[in-house]
Image (cartoon, grey):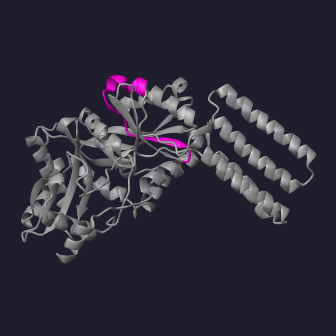
Amino acid sequence: MKQATGLRARERVVVHVDSTAARWISALAVLSLSWWVLLLHKDLAWSLTVLGAVVLIARGIFLGRPVTAGHATAAMVVCILGIAAVFLAFDLLGNLLLVTSAVLLMWPTSARPNPADLPRILGLVNATSGDPLAPFAMQSSKCYHFSADGTAAIAYRTRLGFAVVSGDPIGDDAGYTALVADFATMCHTRGWRIAVLGCSERRLNLWSNTAVLGRKLSAVPIGRDVIIDVAAFDMVGRQYRNLRQAVQRTRNFGITTEVVDEQGLEAELLAELTEVILASPSGARTERGFSMSLDGTLEGRYPGVALIIARDKAGRVQGFHRYATAGNGTEVTLDVPWRRRGAPNGIDERLSVDMIGKARQQGAQRLSLAFAAFPEIFTDKQRNLPRSLVFTMVHLGDPLIALESLYRYLRKFHALGDQRYAMVTLTQVVPLLVVLLSLEFVPRRRRLTSGSVVRASLS
């Protein structure tokens, strides 16, 4: 029996059309009926209201969206209110309510995360090698679609009728092709359209089969992985001059570092690190991110997460980085860097370099330093119009994430790797942009434990 344990329908499905032919026939039948209503009724406003409602219902039928008991109940209540409003001569309000009832009837269902899936996902992350985004599959807001034998899974979230896949599948790659086909079938039955955010170059073929997916997904490059070969890394040569200088500045300042297990934090250290988060320039109370971030900083929720901490000569914590692992420790990936406002320059470079050394000692093969989004935009001195527009949009987003500053930090390591892509349907680019940007940038409340906040306030 195929498993999709991360999927929980809000109510039992009561109406569903599950073949393309049936969807076409049903949608055309509903539209044809609406024309008869329009011909028999001479009130233009009412006719347009009926037409709008019917078009919305026909569209939902064509997309294959299931109608649940909750959908039907909500739509019926709003429809009755609309008819009552028209009867009481509130025509505009009544018309709006009638159209709203059609929207509610065909509103897309969504999937809900299942916390019980986490132990299985942890096992699959440990079985995944060569993928720096694999640890981020553990993020608690994600749902999962498992292969029939449970040896692979896809992490995703649903929003506004889209199932957005996070990165590549995890687990045994021998079952990825069948897993994607089964996932596409499941999405088809739910009326969800598929998009992928953070697809690697080597997995593009998984999402290129139009016959399996039902529509064509186009690959749009969004940036490059930054991957350090920990065994070969050194800072010798002119190209690493800026990196050496940054690291040396912190040594001159008396900065020392240590690596600790996030799950083993003692109360005093937890309070110190919480205070750093609260004193950071931004993001203290909220967290963002979808495909390339992990939540639950300092909560000790996920095994295999390490923190590397920088202290000044007085012993005060000035910053720390959070790293997650995959492939039984062979893959190490930077999640979030934190630094105190006014911390010495070079803190991030020092933490990264020292973590590379620690990863080498522990037998890791690769360490991923964040993600360089649109690096070509920052190196191109003769931008054409499209690239100039992207460059402007990137800087408009600086309050959320300063991509150029991030790029200038990452380029010191000279480790730009393979491209990552968004796999999207170009005919739906506008709603997809809304969905993807909301997943990445809409803030979620950070759950700093009350005990750590109290201790931090007393420090």
Classify 201 as above or below 444.
Answer: above
* Residue 290: image location, x then y, percent: 39, 49
Residue depicted at x 41% and y 27% = 179
> Left or right: 306 with respect to 422?
left
Near-viewer residue (206 or 1): 1
Q: Is residue 440 left or right of residue 159?
A: left
**Residue at left offset 32%, top offset 28%:** 151
Q: Position of residue 261 (x, y in %)?
A: 15, 52
**Towards the viewer: 340 or 285:** 285
Position of the N terminus, as image quadrant, is: top left
Q: Is residue 170 magenta?
A: yes
On the picture, is 108 further left or further right than 169? right
Who's the residue at 19% across and 45% down the image? Answer: 304
Whether the magenta-drawn stretch holds residue 405 is answered as no
Judged left or right of residue 299, residue 174 is right
Q: Quadrant of residue 78?
A: bottom right
Q: Quadrant of the C terminus?
A: bottom left
Q: Over which residues does the magenta segment extend?
A: 160-179
410 in relation to 81, above or below? above
Q: Residue furthest bottom?
A: 458
Residue 316 visible somewhere in the drawing: yes
Count every numbered label the image shows and give the total.
Answer: 0
- Asked if residue 236 can be seen in this view, the reply is no
Q: Residue at x 25, y 48 (%)?
A: 302
Residue 120: image location, x then y, percent = 30, 36
Residue 256 or residue 379, whichever sits in front: 256
Where residue 43 appears, as percent x and y from the top left, is 90, 54
